[in-house]
Amino acid sequence: MSETLIYIRSVAKDPVQWSPAAAVPMSGNIYRITSVPAGESLEFRVGDMVKGQMGTFPDGSEALLAVARA
């Protein structure tokens, strides 16, 4: 399967910031994280299975967000 871009919430920054990561779709809205930016402290790690959901950033752009562990 091909990788897709998913955004993961940073746990070390306030206000909330999202970092891009790579994930492989598994089934429905479930994704497996395959890579994350080096040095980032994120809510999910490589190998984690997450639920993905479309979300809107403050600038109005939309993206796939990792919102919970699957």
Image: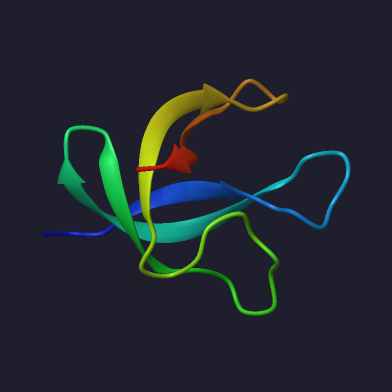
Rendered residue at 43%/26% (across/down): 54
Along the line of sight, the residue nearer the viewer: 45 or 5: 45
Along the line of sight, the residue nearer the viewer: 23 or 50: 50
Position in image of residue 27 (x %, y %) = 14, 41
Q: Is 39 on the left-hand or right-hand side of 35?
A: right
Give the answer, above or below, for where 61 lies relative to 50. Answer: above
Position in image of residue 34 (x %, y %) = 35, 68
Where the C terminus falls, by quadrant? top left
Q: Is 55 on the left-hand or right-hand side of 19?
A: left
Along the line of sight, the residue nearer the viewer: 51 or 23: 51
Give the answer, above or below, for where 40 lies relative to 69. Answer: below
Q: Is 59 on the left-hand or right-hand side of 19?
A: right
Residue sitting farthest toward the bottom: 38
Position in image of residue 28 (x %, y %) = 17, 33
Rendered residue at 57%/27% (across/down): 61
In the picture, residue 24 is in which quadrant? bottom left
Rendered residue at 61%/54% (across/down): 43
Position in image of residue 41 (x %, y %) = 70, 66
Task: Give the number of callouts.
Answer: 0
Residue sitting farthest toward the front: 70
Residue sitting farthest toward the left: 1
Where the N terminus falls, by quadrant? bottom left
Give the answer, above or below, for where 40 lies relative to 54. Answer: below
Rendered residue at 47%/39% (across/down): 68
Q: How is the image coloured?
A: rainbow
